[in-house]
Amino acid sequence: MRLILRFAAACWDLYARAFSFVASSALSNRGITLSLFAVCVLLITGPWLRSSVSRDFRGVHIPWNNLASSRFLPEYVAESPREWRWDSIAVPLLAIVATGVLIALVRPRWTPYAFGVLLMASIPALAVTLWNHPGLYEFFESEIRGRSMLRTVYGMEHVDLMTVRAPDRMQAFGGQTGKIDLLEPTHPLLVPFNYWMYGPWLIAAAAIGVLSTKRASWWSRSSFLGGWAAAGIVLALASTWPRWAAEYYWTQADAFEERNQFDESALALEQARETMPHLGYMRRYWLQRGKIDYRRHDNSKYCAFFVAMQYLEVGDVERARAELEPYVDTDSAAAARDLMAEIIGHTAAGYNAHGKREAAELAWREAASIAPWKPVYWVAHAVTVVGTAPSRAREIEDRYLAELCEVGDCFVGCDLATALGDAYFENGDFEDARRMYAMAMDIFHLPKYVNLHAQEGRLGM
């Protein structure tokens, strides 16, 4: 008995010593510093940009520059899974963190400088993310419009599907419509603030690291922090300078156009494009160039783009398509194909709303072929097909289910699996229906949003 008691006491003593060692190490200055560096790693590799339907863009996906060689345009990078990029903003940040961990272990007194360098680098990284890739934010804006089309498609299948009644990822839970304020006119320099995520938190974490590891008075700590932050702001201005210069020329183009000086306006617009070539691929550039060409009676593809956009805004999709269609083929610019796909998508949504599913199926398939980098169109096509012909559920599953990884909105993905499950159920394939319903429940894992009626249907209650 004594031997057992002694053994138990020895085990308890060993446990207490181990727990004390781990706790003291974790709560020591060095342990807290390493923990803060680990948090920085999570923030660096976590989502920096969030879209309405597509997957998040993480720090390892976003490059520093917008040169043609980086090919960081929606038609190349929207589809998932995305590869880690060696030219991404995350690479130097992770290198700084790795160096900071070694410094914290070997020379703890130098740790404030490691956090200072991290702060200095994270500020331009966030600036590059926000302002060096304007085409990406046009893609985000178009996905919000596409999400509203999906509401119509899913609404024709069942009003209790989550996409119909739930908000998208860009809206707080509890709303019933899309984030309308994102569609209101906003200056392009302010639009990115609707989509940023972890970048500001990385700056905050680095700033906390500077303040907490610097051994000095609070005034000295604040001055030390301000110096590193000022250096980061200077680097941010340097890394995004082409965007600011391009916006200056763009403002000049607007001013010249308002004074009916169309040639000068076109020249200023071209200066903006030459300063930042990425702007030439955007819908914004095509609209401005088309507006100038329209006012000086130049029947160019830009003019057709501008006129088609005006027809689309007033709901005349037939005339919009007729205006733009001669200039769109598989080799056309992405901006033209994107607008054509959106025009066809509005047509297809109208067919869905009026119960013309066969016509809607053809229209959604055409839109998906014109803009294959946008998941909204193939999702709408898949749901329309299984709603029209449940016997084609196997065909749709084989064709599209593997691409579900491109959809970041769990409501859209959950409802796509549910639509397939409903089709299998109507066909009498109960095992496959149960499998699709189980997949829908796996995709839907948000405890903050509860739709009991829809969830009970998936669980077979």
Image (cartoon, rainbow, N blue to C red):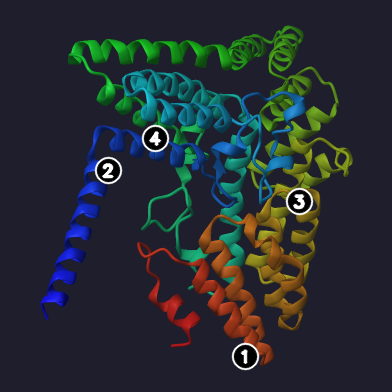
Foreground mark, 4 or 2?
2
Q: Which residue is mark 3?
A: 372
Alpha carbons under labels 4 and 2: distance apart: 13 Å
Residue 447 in percent (x, y) is at 37, 65
Name which of mark 4 and mark 3 comes first in the sequence: 4
Foreground mark, 1 or 4?
4
Q: Which residue is mark 4?
A: 37
Alpha carbons under labels 1 and 4: distance apart: 50 Å
Q: Which residue is mark 2?
A: 26
Q: Quadrant of residue 360?
A: bottom right
Q: Are marks 1 and 3 in contact (CB under 8 Å)?
A: no
Instruction: Tell me which amino acid carries mark 1.
Output: Phe
Name which of mark 1 and mark 3 comes first in the sequence: 3
Residue 194 in percent (x, y) is at 46, 37
- The relative height of residue 288 versus residue 327 in the rendered view (above or below) is above
Q: Which residue is mark 1?
A: 430
Furthest-front residue in this view: 3
